[in-house]
Amino acid sequence: MITSVHVVGAGRVGSALAARLAERGLLLTERGPDLVLLCVPDRAIAEVARTVDSGPWIAHVSGATPLAALDPHTRRFGLHPLQTFTRARGAEQLDGAFAAVTAATEAAREVGFWLSRTLGLEPFALADEKRDAYHAGAAIASNYLVTLRRAAGSLLEAAGAPPESLEPLMLRTIENGFELTGPIARGDWATVETHVAAIRRERPELESMYTTLAETTKELL
């Protein structure tokens, strides 16, 4: 039974996790914790893990880092909240998100699933050797959404339209279960060609991105 946790790192993720654990009544302490939760940059995980005394459970919250980074500890697991975080918000950022739990033993998986649910996350098991593919998918969904919003917004600006008008459209696309609409869904490649011409004229740096996305969308239909 986990009753006390030492959260190492007070960045965007660490502060949200610590706040939620405190809400759930767990003791946050550096002295004799049942679990050490590393919320540090990926490049620092292995170094910090080596400074932790053996005995308690230890986990990291990285999506890309393998369990081997927690050597020499054997009571270990990975728990990656599949969410993006900001310092402007608190523990509520965890609500309704999923968590990827990577564990080499059933006991570690049970602790990882328990911790996920305590944090308000819905856990699923993730194999250590599949972590790279998982993290690539997460990066596309989150990071490149930002890229797409900025690219699309720059085209609206070029047309004299407000970029923020895109946001209800993007939200509704999510609410509609990502149902594809528009010229590619209709097979209207003539309209796609007009898009390419307009982009070449107004924002030529975006042409290769647009054509690549159009071809990828076609392949995924």
Image: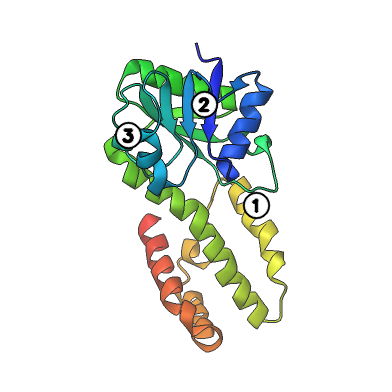
Label 1 vs 3, first from the N-terminus: 3
Q: Earlier in the sequence, mark 3 or mark 2?
A: 3
For the residue pair 6 and 107, the one nearer the viewer reads as 6
Give residue 189's mark. Answer: none
Asked which secondary structure carries label 3, the reply is helix
Task: Using the image, determine if residue 77 lies above or below residue 3.
Answer: below
Query: Label 1 is placed on what type of residue?
Result: Arg
Q: Which residue is mark 1?
A: 172
Mark 1, other Cα within 10 Å: few <14 / some 14–19 / many ≥20: few
Residue 104 is at least partly visible in this image: yes
Q: Residue at x 44, y 23 (%)?
A: 112
Q: Residue at x 71, y 81 (%)?
A: 160
Residue 181 in view here: no
Residue 174 position, x and y percent, is 59, 49
**Farthest residue toward the top?**
1
The percent position of residue 103, horizontal first and vertical second, equals: 34, 26
- Residue 67, which numbered label? 3
Q: Return the x and y of residue 42 as percentages of the image width and height.
A: 41, 46
